[in-house]
Each structure stands twice: as C-alpha cells, then as structure tokens.
Amino acid sequence: MVLKGRNSQGVWEPKVASGLGYTVRASNGIPKVISVGLTDAVKPKMNEDPFYVRVGVCYSDSKTGVRPDAKFKVSRGYKSWGGNGVNYNAPKIRRYFNRLHALYQGEICHDLDAQPRDPGDLSQNLKANGCPAHGVVIADGLVVGGKCPDGSAPEMAGGEQSCIYKPSELSEGTFEQLAPGGKPDVTKYHYDKTTGMLFFYVVQNEANAHASSPIGSCVSGTDPACPDKDESFYGCPAQGCTTYKIEITDSDYSFGPSQCGGAGAADLYAKVPKFVLPEPANANKLGYVQPGTAGEVIAQNLQSAQGFPHRAAMTPPVCTGTP
C-alpha cells in the first residue's frame, strides 16, 4: 500500500494483521533512526498467542546502494499514547494508563516523535533518555503475594509503588533464527547484506488494558455520560505500547530512495523466495462465540459462515498490476 503520511511529520499508520509480513520502502529513503510500534492490537489470549507482524525495512545508501556491512541497533520497549485531559497521577487512572513522560528516571517516550515537549525542541522521544522507555504501571491492585506480574519488578515511579518493565536490545541473528518453529523470536533481528533488507518481528504479548476509560476529563462514576465498566478505549497495555527503535549506526550513512531487490516489493520476493511468508492459518475467516457455550471461538470461512449477519464477496478477488 502507498502511504502519504500524516501532516508531513513522517508518520504512517497502516492497519496490519497478525501473522503477516510487511515490507517498508520509502521514495526518499529510510532515515538513520526510525520507530515502529503497535496500538489497538486485538487478539484472544495474547499472553499465550501474541499479536505479531514481521517487518522488513529497505535500507539504501544514496552513494553506495546496498551497504553489506551495515550495523544496526534495534531496541524494544514501551511508549504511551494519548490520555489528554486526565489526571495522570490518579492511582485509579494509573492502573490502566501511564504517561511515560518523566515518570521513571526522566525518560520521555510519549505520543508522536515530532510533537513538541519543550519550546524549540521537537525530538525528546529520540534522545538518549527517550524511546523506547521502561514500561510502568502502578502496583496497586496488581501485586499478588508481594510480587509484580511476570516480566516486571517493583520500584517507585511517579511517587507510587509501581511495577517496572525493562526495555531490551535485540541481537543480530540469521534469517532462520527470526522465527524458529514458526514462533517469532522477539530477541533477534536480521540484516540481509545482499538486498539491504532489515527484518525483525513487532510483537505484543499482553492484552490491552480493559476497564472504564476516561474521555477528556470524564472519569467513571462522576458523570452519567462516562463509559461504563464494560467499555474500554485503551489502545495498549497499562505499562505502555510496544515500540521499537531502529538505528543504523554507520556514521557516514546517507539515505537514498529504497531500491532493495528491484523496482518493487514483488521484485524483492521473486529474487529472494525465502522472504515469502506462508499464509497464516484461519485466514479469510470470521470468528464468533456460539451462544450457550463456554465461550469457545468458532472460526468459519467467510463464504459459508453461519450464525450472524455479514457481508461476503460474490467473486474471488482479482489483482492486476504489481502488488
């Protein structure tokens, strides 16, 4: 898909499906530092079966083309989005949403990287103490038997006892190590020196916070217009949204138009067939819970699904031209 971005800020917001792979190319080239993350991910039992997509980024140098010995630093951690108009310090809010703006060790990783934080400074998210940040969630109501949830540790943040999730740095591996046994490895990335493609998996393995959500200054129980306990508009887990920072560390890198594998993505995958992902199981399926059951999710083909109204294509899709 061709994306034009948001307000010339270098931001693109494609909809993605778990299990698929996406190739990122840019007509003006890929900058030295980029960030990639997920919001509003929806999938049953994400702690057991994470939401994930494979991302391939095409790096081309304006002077040399492919850089066979390019070096990268790929980090995974957390970022917060939105929350305007609420009391960020309220314990009731911090159970489900934490604004990662100087909340822990002065780290700032919140909203768009191009949005101003201080006058004259538009890039605190990308500084040394920026993204990705530690994930933070108040411990109130979370700690069981004196322990924080798996993957976090107790520590003070924002004046409250909290559970802190550490960011991590990915290590370089072979292409085959990215998904051993078909399961994405969140600790690895791979750079293909023959094409200039950098591959890694963007993974969210925790469900988004689910509780009554504040809208503007509205907090549940204070106004009948507020969302009730069964509604939720939180786009991420309470400790923050999964986010990645990718930096090519070559000091003399000069980005140029993406040219990996040829003129288009189809050329790349024809040239390197191993990059092609198999279609995920249950693709082109609808899922619903059968009334009167214990909650088992039923998946049926779009053309034959029964049980609720839906639209289905009359004829199979037809693609023309270059994908």
Image (spheres, grey):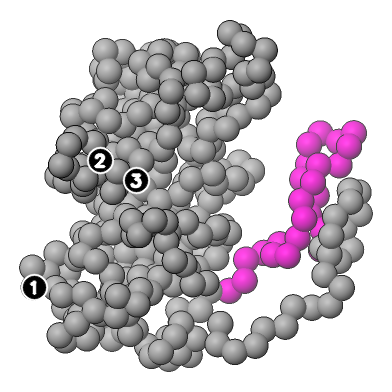
Secondary structure type for disc 2? loop
Residue at 87% x, 73% y is 314
View extreme (left): residue: 251
Residue 148, can we see it?
no
What amino acid is found at the position of numbered circle 2 in the picture?
Pro
Secondary structure type for disc 3? loop
Magenta-colored span: 278-301
Q: Is residue 265 left or right of residue 71?
A: right
Q: Quadrant of the C terminus?
A: bottom right
Q: Tell me, yes or no, whether the two marked residues, 1 and 3, touch with CB atoms within 8 Å.
A: no
- Separation of residues labelled 1 and 3 (CA atoms): 27 Å
**Rendering coords of residue 39 (x, y %):** 48, 45
**Rendering coords of residue 262 (x, y %):** 38, 90
- Separation of residues labelled 2 and 3 (CA atoms): 9 Å
In this picture, is 286 found above or below 130?
below
View extreme (top): residue: 222
Residue 190, can we see it?
yes
* Circle number at residue 252: 1
**Rendering coords of residue 62 (x, y %):** 19, 82
Secondary structure type for disc 1? loop
**Rendering coords of residue 159 (x, y %):** 26, 13
What amino acid is found at the position of numbered circle 1 in the picture?
Asp
Q: Is residue 45 left or right of residue 65?
A: right
Residue of label 3: 112
Mark 1, residues whose alpha carbon is within 10 Å: few (<14), some, or many (≥20)?
A: few
- Residue 290 is covered by the magenta coloring: yes
* Circle number at residue 116: 2
